[in-house]
Amino acid sequence: MRAWIDASAKYALINTHGEDQAPISTRLTALTEAKLRAGGIPVPHA
């Protein structure tokens, strides 16, 4: 029973690891836009 619980916990960890990560281009665009807005440069929302 213990082995099943351990395996289940490991699977859940691996399964949800990359869930929140967007493609690098999307994250980079959001970061760049945030920095520009923080600097007072108007950036239109897409």
Image (cartoon, grey):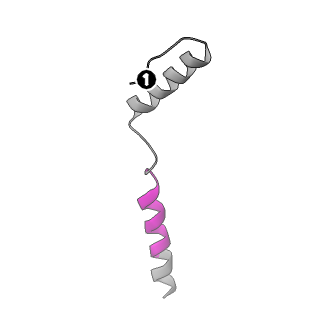
Residue 7 appears at what percent x and percent y?
Answer: 45, 74
> Which residue is labeled 1 in the image?
45
Q: Nearer the viewer, residue 30 or 16?
A: 30
Q: Residue at 54% of width from left, 16% of height from top?
A: 36
Magenta-colored segment: predominant secondary structure: helix
Range drawn in magenta: 7-18
Q: Is residue 40 above or below residue 13?
A: above
Identify the element where label 1 is drawn.
loop
Vertical order, 27 against 15 (above or below) = above
Q: Indicate the position of residue 38 as horizontal and vertical percent values.
A: 61, 18
> Where is 16 relative to 45, above or below?
below
Nearest the eye: 45 or 13: 45
Residue located 44% across and 25% down the image = 29
Callout 1 amino acid: His
Residue furthest toward the bottom?
A: 1
Nearest the eye: 41 or 27:
41
